[in-house]
Amino acid sequence: MAKSIGFKKKNTAIFISGNGSNLENLIKFSLNEKSPIQIKFVVSNKKKAKGLRYPKNFNIDFKVYSFVNKSKSENRILKDLRKKKINLICLAGFMKILSKNFIKKFGYKILNIHPSLLPKYKGLNTHKRVIENNEKYSGCTVHYVSSRLDSGKIILQKKVRIKKKENHKKLAKRILHQEHILYPKAIMKIFNL
């Protein structure tokens, strides 16, 4: 299937902690013939993550790692990633910060999507903070992962105008919709497609 576009799809792992709407979106994107990725593995740090229903539905291998001992969990993940010949990681609402050691040992690209216009509003509760600060715009950012929180090189951003009297839940919904458009675009961009 991928032959017609002249490249072999990248074996990709998606890391999640929650609902997994970006995971579902990336799985659907990966099934497109023009997509440069093939999702082979899903990693979660929460065994009750709602998003784990997607790998089950699409018959993709997944595994939950406790992160009680971070370095042990990271080493186990690295071992599993090697076994599955993974050469791209996409973080999609993964609520753990990967260590410098993990990033270095993995040795391939790691991407993340964040619900703000980085470098503004790193970390959690972005929509609430944006509204409390009366910002006119927010948005989302896809960036490379570095060992500093939400600080890697930016790949793509999408600006979203905040509506008058909009609450953080409504804003979150609108930005999530943009995330679903932006993440596949950013993946296409890093492979020059």
Image (cartoon, grey):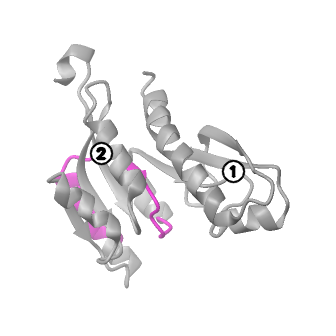
Q: How many marks?
A: 2
The residue under the point 38% across, 60% down is 20
What quarter of the picture does the C terminus occupy? top left
Within 10 angstroms of label 2, few (less than 14), some, or many (20 or more) residues? many
Q: SS at mark 1?
A: loop
Residue 118's label in the rendered image is 1
Residue 156's label in the rendered image is none
Query: Which three-letter amino acid code belongs to the residue tagged 2?
Result: Ile
Q: Which residues lie in the magenta part? A: 74-98
Residue 95 inside the magenta-drawn segment: yes
Q: In this view, does 16 lie to the left or right of 38?
A: right
Q: Which residue is nearer to you in this view: 151 or 49?
A: 49
Within 10 angstroms of label 1, few (less than 14), some, or many (20 or more) residues? many
Disc nearest the viewer among 2 and 1 = 2
Q: Earlier in the sequence, mark 2 or mark 1?
A: 2
What quarter of the picture does the N terminus occupy? top left
The residue under the point 36% across, 53% down is 23
Q: Is residue 170 above or below residue 69?
A: above
**Residue 70, image quadrant:** bottom left
The residue carrying mark 2 is 27
Q: SS at mark 2?
A: helix
Give the CA distance from mark 2 to mark 1.
Answer: 25 Å
Disc 2, disc 1: CB below 8 Å?
no
Q: Position of residue 139 (x, y in %)?
A: 66, 48
Q: Which residue is nearer to you in this view: 104 or 177?
A: 177
The residue under the point 22% across, 57% down is 55
Q: Is residue 151 left or right of residue 72?
A: right
Residue 149 inside the magenta-drawn segment: no
Q: Where is residue 189 in the image (x, y as percent from the top left)?
A: 49, 28
Q: In this view, does 175 lie to the left or right of 14?
A: right
The residue under the point 38% across, 75% down is 71
Q: In this view, does 136 lie above or below 165?
A: above
